[in-house]
Amino acid sequence: MTEPYAVPVPRGYRVGGWEVREPIATGAFGSVYEGRRRDGQPAVAALKFLPTGTGTPRQLSHLRELVDRELELYRRLRRPRLIRMYDTLVVDDPERPELDGATVLVLEKAQTSLAALLATRPRPPSGPALLAQICEGLAQLHRAHWVHGDLKPANVLLMEDGSARLADFNMAAELEGTHAYTPAFSTPDYTPPELLWAEIGERGRRIRPSADIWAFGVLAHLVLTDTFPLPGGTPTARRDAAATYARGTEDLRLSPELPDDWREIIADCLTRTHAERVTVEPLLRRVEAAAGTAHSPRPLLAHRPRRTTIAAALLATGALTALGWGISEWTSEDHPAAGASATASVTPAIYGAAELRTDKGVPAAFRVLIVESAHDCAQEDVTPALIAAMLKTESDFDPDLSDPANDEYGIARWTPRVLRYWMNADGTPADTVPTPPFPPAESIPAMGRYLCWIAPRLDAGLPGDRRVLIAVAYRTSYDTVNDAGGVPGKHRAYADRIARFLKEYTPPGAK
């Protein structure tokens, strides 16, 4: 190690079946190590040790709050651009008081961080594409009404395939109206002027989503030019320059090396006041256009444990066998997880009402599966209404459908040999061909994954509703739809039924 670790853990130390291996990184409140195990999946993970068992009462209270913030976000949000959490452990080792009681997060292991990449390649050729993925992660957080609160290169992790994930959520907070409350800690270079000397109340510092937008502007300028957007040789000098800029006595002087489109984007992130700052949705569209990724296939599903999140949630509530017919309350990835300290719950009859009509006969028992399966896909055309329309067309929502003549079974009419490739959430084929019956908790998420794979493979410019084309490609193949230049003649009746139910299930104002 080249620096003291906040939580020193010796190589070979064992916790919960994991063995600590090489150190990866450390921060002020926690340290990350590679962990390995011989049994179970995954075999390799990142173990983040957060000390919560020793210290003064005030220190313990603060550390507990940071741990709780990070755990809450990991439990409630699972998105393709956010690093995954597999498990949480607590160290029980009275003989090591420095570790006893520490919380350990078992996380998806990244290859490196953006900070490490910039240290060796200050202007990575993949910079614009990485920025598009980082912005997509921010959009996923903000859509779920969370603020990251500490966006910087060290908190952007890069996976083995080069894709980006946002990480380190102990400063993250859920919005309460227009604001959230975070601890009084930040990295000055990425902190907007309005927060540099903000008042700290009993609940911490009030923060808006616009703080993440400012941080993204600083990060984008650094990635594209290897310089900070505000002058100064030290963080303190740049902090003072930010204050001068905010008062209006100095103008923003961005690097002349920035292309015009990026110059405009960064300027709209780094406005003097939060009210002038661009919001994340238009920002994402502009960043994707500038990066040339607006119409390219996005990573579809991040790696997860083999059992789907949705199925695991059903099992945790004892609902898988009954499939929800007698359930009065559910939780989702954007609401407290089962067993967490829930502050709100939602009945299945109205779950996802903004995206899926509640008065058109979609069975309440399947709404959570439908909505969350659509949310698991980064393709905007894969919507809850599309999945519902397809289930209606394929089976009339019959979970027990059996059509041996066509070798199709269950609510999504899966052929066993095809389902094998889509039933695992981590994208790996099942070891064996599954045997019917196929429960909805397996069939519906698999349908979402398959549609998500199909969507970017359809040619651009095909006539008609793209959602209908995706559905037809599910029934036949994307090659058949592309070769036909749209809906093939023999599938027009099927397409018409999909279009009718799409219109019926889509709420006014939603796509």
Image: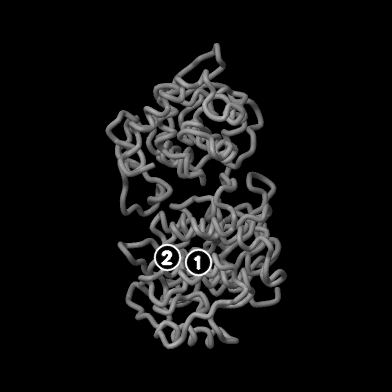
Q: Specify the farthest residue to the top.
A: 405
| Pointer 2 residue | 278
Q: Label 2 is placed on what type of residue?
A: Val
Q: Is residue 292 left or right of residue 68?
A: right
Q: Position of residue 474 (x, y in %)?
A: 54, 29
| Pointer 1 residue | 265
Q: Is residue 440 above or below residue 384?
A: above
Q: Is residue 258 left or right of residue 200?
A: right
Q: Is residue 53 visible?
A: no
Q: Position of residue 268 (x, y in %)?
A: 46, 69
Q: Label 1 is placed on what type of residue?
A: Ile
Toward the viewer: 257 or 328? 257
Circle 1 Cα neighbour tier, 10 Å, few/some/many (<14 / 14–19 / ≥20): some
- The kind of secondary structure element at disc 2 is loop
Of callouts 1 and 2, which one flags the residue occurring earlier in the amino acid sequence?
A: 1
* Picture quadrant where residue 163 is located: bottom right
Q: Position of residue 352 (x, y in %)?
A: 35, 42
By what rule are the colours in the image chosen?
one colour
Q: Quadrant of the C terminus?
A: top left
Separation (CA) of disc 1 from disc 2: 9 Å
Toward the viewer: 492 or 505? 492
Q: Which residue corresponds to the image point at 42% horizontal and 63% vertical from the top-left?
A: 147
**Contact? badges 1 and 2 (CB < 8 Å):** yes
